[in-house]
Image (spheres, helix red, strand yellow):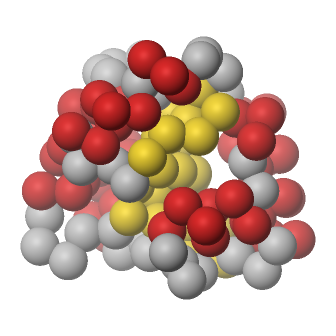
Amino acid sequence: MATTVLIVDDHSAFRSRARRMLEADGYTVVGEAGDGASAIEAARRLAPDLVLLDLQLPDRSGFAVAAEITAATSSPAVVMTSTRDGSDFAAMARRNGARGFLHKELLSGDVLERMLT
């Protein structure tokens, strides 16, 4: 099971909610980022087990960020999130190296664990 998490989202309120929820479920949030460039740098520096990655960031798409993060040797698992309907994005997320797509309303430690095993 992934235990350390980097949360990437341009909305600080979502990052705070996700942090509280994941920490309550036993995860350790090692960092947060609000844009793609910061996410890539933080993923390299912090080496989390999991990157929870928003689909749409201010400086680039989450798909591009996922592809760059997962291209590295021993890269973390990436799960993409959005408030949009995932039926359009799940396959695209996987093509860009992500393990899958999760609607933000469904986020929980249990759901992430099932996605990653």
Q: Residue at x 42, y 33 (%)?
A: 90
Whether residue 112 is situated above or below residue 95 in the rendered picture: below
Which residue is located at x 30 percent, y 21 percent? Answer: 60
Q: Nearer the viewer, residue 62 or 99?
A: 99
- Residue 36 image point, x, y percent: 35, 35
**Residue 49 shows up from this direction:** yes
Q: Where, quadrant-wise, is the N terminus in this rendering?
A: bottom right
- The percent position of residue 116, horizontal first and vertical second, equals 49, 68
**Which residue does the image show at 33% across and 49% down from the upper left?**
98
Left or right: residue 76 versus residue 27 is left
- Tell me, yes or no, if residue 10 can be seen here: no
Image position, residue 6 (x, y; %):
52, 60
Q: Is 39 rendered above or below residue 37?
A: below
Q: What is the quadrant of residue 43 in the picture?
A: bottom left
**Where does the image place residue 102, in percent across and percent down from the top left?**
59, 40
Nearer to me, 4 or 34: 4
Q: Is residue 35 left or right of residue 13?
A: left
Q: Vertically, is 6 above or below 58? A: below
Number of callouts in the render? 0
Indicate left or right for 84 with 20 as reference.
left
Residue occupying image coordinates x 20% and y 77%: 74
Q: Seen in the image, is 82 located left or right of residue 95?
A: right
